[in-house]
Amino acid sequence: MAYASPIPRWSILQRPTATSGFWSWITTVDHKRIGILYGVTSFAFFLLGGMEALLIRLQLARPEGRLLDAESYNQLFTMHGLTMVFLVVMPLSAAFFNYLIPLQIGARDVAFPRLNAFSYWIFLFGGLFIYSSFFLGGAPNGGWFGYAPLSSETLGVNMDFYAVGLQIVGLGSLVASVNFIVTILNERAPGMSLMRMPVFTWMTLVVSFLLLFALPVIAVALFQLTGDRILGTHFFDAAFGGDPVLWQHMFWVFGHPEVYVLILPAMGIVSEVLPTFSRKPLFGYPAVVFAGAAIGFMGWGVWAHHMFTSGLGPVANAAFALSTMFIAVPTGIKIFNWLGTMWKGSITLNTPMLFSIGFVAMFIIGGLSGVTHSIVPSDFQQHDTYYVVAHFHYVLFGGAIFGLMSGAYYWFPKVSGRMFSEGLGKLHFWMMLIGFNMAFAPMHWLGLQGMPRRIYTYEAGLGLDLWNMVSTIGAFTIAASFVVFMVNIVRSLSRGEEAGADPWDARTLEWTTSSPPPHYNFAEIPTVKARDDLWHRKYTEDPSGKPVPVVAGAGDHSGEDEHHDIHMPDPSFWPIVAASGLPFIGYGIIFAWPWAVVGILLAVTGLFGWSLEPVAEEGGH
Amino acid sequence: MATTEAAQETHRTATGLDNRKLGMWAFLGSECLFFGALITAYLLYRNSSTQGPYQSDVYDIPFTSVSSFVLLMSSLTMVLALAAIQRGDHQKLHVWILATAFLGMTFLGGQVFEFTVFVREGLTVTRNVFGSSFFVLTGFHGLHVTIGVLMLLQLFGMSTAGRLPQEQSLRVELVGLYWHFVDIVWVIIFTVVYLIP
Amino acid sequence: MEHTEHQTTTAGEHAHPGPAEYVKVAIVLAIATAIEIGLYYITSLPDAAVTFLLLFLMVFKFALVALWFMHLRFDNRLFRRLFVTGLILAMTVFAIVLTTFQVVR
């Protein structure tokens, strides 16, 4: 039955067609390009967050340092935390999700390509919005955790940028989580059952559910904070019957699942890298998958371990102490499975492998200090000291960053088509490992000796001088290691040896495509017959279990030019238009409401254009 | 290249379920946490205000009962609209979509009236924690209803322009899911905020 | 989970109620609402009993709309699981939050 097309014939709604050049990046809906955008942007924020850290360490290198005053220091450590959590680790993980998930599940793109672009632009604009605070009255200065009533009552626009800026970037993540859940559940190739998916894909699914359910809680908390600051509500105002502890609950109900959001992608990466360079399948795949899901599930039951000193009472404290101890179990399961993967494997100690092994070692240390936090009386001594700073840097830097670096080196050949310099990669690793431990190991005993967190200076003669200096030297060593990394990347992009489709002799589907993959990913959607499908296409086993190459069993390397008939979702500029409204709404809330009107108009126009433009053939959105 | 709305409907998925419907249910799952957090703040603060007015000073249960009933019945008209387009009855679709939007706007009108009265009686969002938590909770709910009404009117516009064929009944279904959810949140709010002693 | 492929359909996958049945559900909802309002005005019952009954009716109405109007009763189980997960998570986590406040106060 014929029906009128829902698309009016307005030329502004014609889909853009550019495939190269600046405009093509602005309008891209290709998950691989969006992944690259996320990766580059988050690395830029990493450099900013790193500089903030170096300034902090310069100030603390000596007692009674005079580099920074207290107010500047407060802004720097707050922004360092906000940057690293929300503008680096999360989007860097998103870079990997974006680039890899469709390739790993045998799909051509995510379920909602334009929504994917929308998430990225929200991240970029939200991050710029938060950083604009430095020039518009002062950056957030109440800690990344924004405890009330300091956050709700402090004067100036600093914490307004916190409340509104986080709200904006949170929206991008929420939208992305819906996208990845639907993609992973619905877009898998035939034969790719859930238990045949790569562990990285599984961890992405768990992370997406964590975000889906945790972000609304911080959204409410931030609305309440914005209300208290700008509208005059009393959610956290004890004088009117409000309670600052409500903020803590709301923040950590989000915040604890959030730390699993930060670590699970890196764990997924490590679960891919270790098997490849041990030339063995992941030991206990079902256990690793279930442990990941268990961590995601149990992560909802531990949040108040961040609040042991806030007066919850012994019953609540004991209950959360127990749940916190229990959550160490699935993590331990993963660690033993990773070790089991390497045991008697044919190990190659190249750069990605070194970073993954470094992850395991550093994460064990960070996990152990975490377990010491679970013991309430012990935590009373550790809380608000540098011991906690040591713990979370071991899990978030020693863990997440090492894991993400492992992934960066592992998939660099796939994304760029080039090999990086192994020599420089190893140099980066060793400098980073040494610098990292110099920077953060001393913080364990500095904390136990009583050095509080979030202080801009300390007195001489308290026994804190030496190790603060060592820590600062470590921090600069880390920075130098990243100079090596950047040199490696830049040189390799232009002069690296050609990588080919499968330089590592790996196990999963992304290595069946050319490097970089064609824009349509797969000439033909693969039919999956087993877990580690690529490995089984390349090898069978001889009677002793050793891999034997199958003749001509390698994957599909169709070149780009052969398949003009595969239509991919068309580019679109409405996602960036819609996203651009959000920072204006933010400025309107903080400064003058007319800006919010501009923002709403931009956002609504963007959404209307989005819903009215012609839809591409592949069923995306 | 012809636009291929129909092709969307037959895009193969691993679960057999439509991407957009799966996405909508995931989103509604997350909305449970959103409204749960707002309701929790209300429950925490309902007897904590250090000064009035308090609930018994301002609530008008008969009035709120009527508007709750109106919103509840809008779920009926919504599902009748969906049933209509699924059997290809565009006339009835128009009637029921418009009815749903109308009932939704009546509800919103009732909310606006109720809030105006409360403010006149001294209960503002800044007066006490009851005011803060009440207005923020019901305000966000009202915002959700407003967005729902706008989506209903867009559907109505598309349908009267002949651009909402039977094959695209999923669009109506998706708006319907959102609408019913907003209704059941009110079912909870009405009981927990207004009725519970 | 099985990896069977299906063509998606726009109408429900299984037999689903017609308008008459929806109207019946709406009548039940209206009656439940009437009882709720009545309960509010009955002063002879103890508070705890009224609260319990009101909550019961609330859950009943919620379930009716979710299962019939939102079609969860007749649709693929995955939708129900997604929604119920969010619901149960919210109820559990926030119940714990509220409990910690009562313990202290």
Image: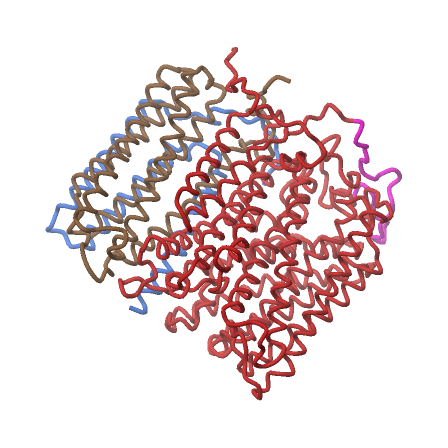
Chain colours: A red, B brown, C blue
Q: Residue furthest right?
A: A551
B195 left or right, relative to B2: left
Decide whether residue A205 is among the magenta residues.
Answer: no
Question: Which residue is farthest bottom?
Answer: A461
Residue B20 or A601: which is nearer the viewer?
A: A601
**Per the image, is A548 magenta?**
yes
**Location of residue A13 (image quadrant):** top right
- Counting from the top left corner in percent of width and height, residue A600 is at 44, 38
The quarter holding residue B184 reads: top left
Give the residues in magenta.
A536-562
**Residue B105 position within the rendered picture, expressed as x and y whole percent measured from the top left:** 29, 31
* A438 lies left or right of A385: right
Report whether residue A346 is seen.
Answer: yes
Identify the residue at image location x=51%, y=77%: A452
Picture quarter containing residue A366? bottom right
Which x, y percent locates residue A269? Answer: 68, 54
Q: Is residue B86 visible?
A: no
- The image quadrant where one finds the N terminus of chain B is top right
Tell me if C86 is positioned left or right of A485 in this view: left
The residue shown at (39%, 54%) is A226
Q: Nearer the viewer, residue A491 or B173?
A: A491
Q: Is residue A143 above or below residue A552?
A: below
Report the residue at 44% width, 59% height from top: A159
Above/below status of A314 relative to A502 = below
> Does B108 sit above or below residue A241?
above
Residue at 64%, 47% in the rendered image: A38
Q: Residue furthest top?
A: A1
Left or right: where C87 falls relative to A124: left
